[in-house]
Amino acid sequence: MKLGGWGRYPLIETQLKSPSSIEELVQEISKKNSIARGNGRSYGDSAVNKSNTIIVILAGGQSRRFGGGYKTLNKFNNISILDRIIQNFKWLEMEIVLNVNSNEDQFLKTGLHLIKDEHENFQGPLAGIYSSMKWVLESRKNIEWIFTSPSDTPFINNSLVDKFLKTKYIDKTKIILASSSNKTHPVIGMWHISLFKSLEDFLVKKNRKIMLWVEEQNYEILNFENKIYFFNINTQADLAEAIKIEKSLNIQ
């Protein structure tokens, strides 16, 4: 049987299976190349899972409030902010890439694939999302979603991403953003690749406000009770506070 997803996805040859019990269904969808499809509504533009999602860490900022340089490379307790985030995400066994704006050499030691911003002069997170979508379309044909994380949130971890992957979303949702204490965190979220052209058109108009574009799309908010995920380091004082937080949490 030939099936296709929404939008740009071509028809491909598939093997149709109809499990006769819950146990058989669980066994089938646990397989890497299996996807559950119903006869009526489905959840989301396509099911979100590890095999069709890639993690993008956005490291294209200027670190002005930190005093310049690359704040994500600063260490506390002998490990850099960026390395902490990478280590936390590696537990997911998903591909992780790094979006940068300039001076790629500074990030080569991470061992991650580097995606250079298509837009120069530090155009903000949307430019990083756009550049990442473009790279995925050109180089990762099996990927339908990108998960984005800032590079200055040392306590973000695999549990947060796991919740994004396991939550059921309403039909045609294209963006899912994190929220805590009634505050949306627009840089932490899931973005469907089919939005590439919409984002491209938005950026052509010299717009850079994330929520202005998000509100034009079908999006959902995913709430988290643990606010520590979203602690971000903007200043030297924030870095000192992160050391205190880590000590209080007894994180090794």
Image (tube, rainbow, N blue to C red):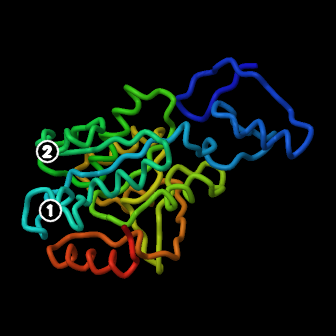
Mark 1 sits on what residue?
63
Please tell me whether residue 244 is drawn above or below residue 162 in the rendered image: below
Q: Is residue 134 above or below residue 14?
A: below
Task: Identify the residue shown where x is 63% and y is 57%.
Answer: 167
Which residue shows up at 16% across the image and 73% down it? 235
Q: In the displayed orientation, state which residue is furthest to the right.
A: 20
Q: Residues within 10 Å of mark 2 (few under 14, many from 20)?
A: few
Looking at the rendered structure, the kind of residue marked 2 is Gln
Q: Nearer the viewer, residue 157 or 215?
A: 157
Left or right of residue 127, residue 53 in this image: right
Q: Alpha carbon of mark 2 to alpha carbon of mark 1: how far? A: 14 Å
Task: Please state the horizontal and vertical placement of residue 93, each as a whole percent of the image.
Answer: 49, 43
Q: Earlier in the sequence, mark 2 or mark 1?
A: 1
- Numbered mark located on residue 106 in the image: 2
Quadrant (top left/top right/bottom left/bottom right) for the N terminus? top right
Which corner quadrant of the image does residue 200 belong to?
Answer: top left
Figure quadrant of the C terminus: bottom left
User: In the drawing, what numbered circle is on residue 135?
Assistant: none
SS class, disc 2: helix
Tell me residue 129's x, y (percent). Answer: 34, 46
Residue 194 at x, y percent in the picture: 48, 38
